[in-house]
Amino acid sequence: MSIATDVASRTGSRDPGRWYVTTAYVSQTFVEGELVTRPSAVVHAKEMGTATTACGLWSYSWRKMLDLPFPLPVGAAPGAKSCPACLAKVIEEW
Ligand SMILES: [Zn+2]
């Protein structure tokens, strides 16, 4: 699935797909032989064009992981845990 296709299929303003992962803590890990940056602690949900997380934290300087949707897909970042407050907010909009 390409990013362009993904964005085109997510046009509704109430679409949970607009949330992506942001985190203050990352580490480098190998995924299928490729070195990638992945969250290593708590991940929060963030919308494009905002400076705060779904739970209201200022996250301007945090790492934005546009390739990772929130909630994290199973196995996407084994060391990471989703923020319960962000999870509640995102699920509330489903
Ligand atoms: Zn959060």
Image: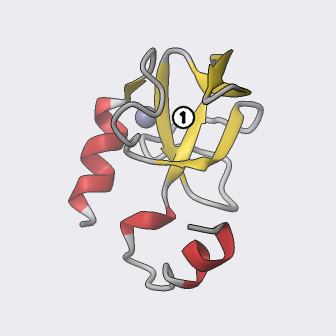
Question: Looking at numbered disc 1 in the image, what kind of residue is underneath it?
Answer: Leu
Asked which quadrant contains residue 80, the reply is top left
Seen as rendered, the residue at the extreme front is: 33
Q: Quadrant of the N terminus?
A: bottom right
User: Badge 1, how many Cα within 10 Å: few under 14, some, many 20+?
Assistant: few
Q: State how the image is colored.
A: secondary structure
Number of marks: 1
Locate the C terminus by quadrant: bottom left
Residue in the image at 37% along x and 30% along y: 82
Q: Is residue 24 left or right of residue 10?
A: right
Judged from the image, the secondary structure of the residue bearing numbered disc 1 is: loop
Identity of the residue drawn at 25% across and 45% down: 88
Taking the spot 24% from the left edge, 54% from the top edge, the residue there is 91
Viewer-proximal residue among 66 and 53: 66
Front residue (pair 50, 31): 31
Q: Can you identify the residue that label 1 sits on?
A: 57
Q: Position of residue 57 (x, y in %)?
A: 54, 34
Q: Tell whether circle 1 marks a residue whose Cβ is less than 8 angstroms from ligand 1.
A: yes
**17, above or below 50, in the image:** below
Location of residue 14 (image quadrant) = bottom left
Residue 69 percent across, percent down from the top left:
49, 51
Residue 24 visible, this orientation: no
Place of residue 48 in the rendered image (x, y in percent of width and height, measured from the top left) = 64, 61
Question: In the figure, is residue 46 to the left or right of 79?
Answer: right
Q: Quadrant of ligand 1?
A: top left
Q: Is residue 66 visible?
A: yes
Residue 19 locus on image (x, y percent): 48, 56
